[in-house]
Amino acid sequence: MCVGCGPDHPTGLHVTVTAGEGLTVSGSFTVTDDHQGAPGLAHGGILSLAFDEVLGSLIWLIGEPAVTGHLETSYRRPVPVGTTLYIGAAIDRVDGRKIYMSASGRENAVDGPVSVTASAVFVVVPATHFVEHGRAVAPSELSEAAAKVAEVNP
Ligand SMILES: CCCCCCCCCCCC(=O)SCCNC(=O)CCNC(=O)[C@H](O)C(C)(C)COP(=O)(O)OP(=O)(O)OC[C@H]1O[C@@H](n2cnc3c(N)ncnc32)[C@H](O)[C@@H]1OP(=O)(O)O
């Protein structure tokens, strides 16, 4: 039920992500009428969510739970409804519990014009973070998330 990536989420973004070489991932997100802000254009907050999702996927490559501490987005071109954004993201460096990341989103092709760029700091947290701070969840929800780590990094 993740609003960013959950395939069954009725109103989510349905972002898909694939692991790349090294500490990189590539993702894609298609802007639909559900994501509109100004007439015919994607809402900036929705684009920020798509980047949070793709950047957040990088944590599966290092196998430690982490949450977004800081996320900064630069909107460089308007993104029309109907666009597919191809988002490439990478871990730039790790400093203690802080993971520094960056990403760029290109319009309609992996080598298309850059529409949005982002940088983020994720902070590693213990797995208990989600139990202590979230609403009560079924153990299966947590174990499914933990299994994703093994799937990416067998
Ligand atoms: C199994 C299921 C898995 C499931 C995993 C699924 C993950 C999906 C994630 C999706 C992405 C999201 O949307 S996550 C949701 C949105 N984000 C959140 O809810 C985070 C809310 N904030 C927090 O919980 C907290 O503030 C933390 C965890 C970020 C930091 O608190 P803390 O744990 O007490 O850490 P603290 O000691 O203060 O700081 C540790 C280091 O990080 C730095 N730091 C702290 N906060 C920030 C910050 N906002 N921006 C930059 N840097 C920061 C500090 O300067 C310090 O650096 P130094 O002194 O060591 O140099």
Image (cartoon, helix red, strand yellow):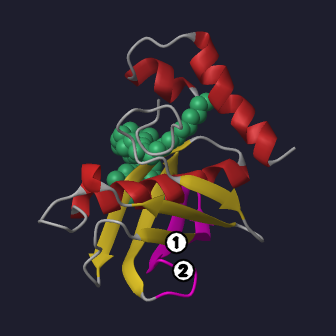
Which span of residues is magenta-colored? 89-112
CB under 8 Å between callouts 1 and 2?
A: yes
Identity, as a three-letter code, of the amino acid under mark 1: Tyr
Q: Residues within 10 Å of mark 2 (few under 14, many from 20)?
A: some
Asked which quadrant contains residue 74, the reply is bottom left
Residue depicted at x 71% and y 45%: 63
Judging depth in this view, the residue of 54 and 127 nearest the camera is 54
Rendered image quadrant of residue 154: top right
Q: Relative to residue 23, is residue 58 depicted above or below?
A: above
- Can residue 142 be seen here? yes
Q: Which residue is mark 1?
A: 86
- Frontmost residue, 24 versus 11: 11
Extreme-left residue of the structure: 38
Q: Residue at horizontal 67%, vertical 48%? A: 60
Q: Report the Cα–Cα distance between label 1 and label 2.
A: 6 Å
Q: Which residue is mark 2?
A: 109
- The quadrant holding residue 88 is bottom right
